[in-house]
Image (cartoon, rainbow, N blue to C red):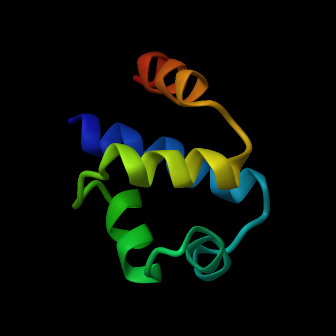
Amino acid sequence: MIDKKFGLILKKLRTAKGISQENFALNTGLHRTYISQLERGLKSPSLRTIGKICGELGISLVRLMEYLEQER
């Protein structure tokens, strides 16, 4: 359940910034298929990966957790 919520939030934030999966992957040093798997809730990211994602999105870890708490 939390993996799906995380994926939805990631996709919303990434697309709101107008960043493609490919560019997002390049900028975070992650593989595009991994980003896709995260967004579909198929994978669970490590804390290190979440940190990279937050850095690219320009948000804090705390803000990301707030988004997760708010998602229904």
Q: How many marks?
A: 0
Check the image and name the residue furthest to the front: 48
> Is residue 16 depicted above or below 47 in this figure?
below
Q: Quadrant of the N terminus?
A: top left
Q: Quadrant of the C terminus?
A: top left
Image check: 3 left or right of 72?
Answer: left
In this view, the residue in front, 28 or 69, is 28
Image point 60% across, 24% down: which residue? 63
Residue 70: x %, y % from top left: 49, 17
Image check: 65 left or right of 40?
Answer: right
> Is residue 53 depicted above or below 24 in this figure?
above
Image point 44% across, 26% down: which residue? 68
| Residue 20 placement: quadrant | bottom right
Image point 30% across, 49% down: which residue? 46
Image check: 66 left or right of 19?
Answer: left
In this view, the residue in front, 72 or 45, is 45
> Is residue 72 depicted above or below 32 in this figure?
above
Check the image and name the residue furthest to the right: 18
| Residue 39 placement: quadrant | bottom left
Image point 28% across, 54% down: which residue? 41
Residue 9: x %, y % from top left: 51, 41
Residue 67: x %, y % from top left: 53, 25
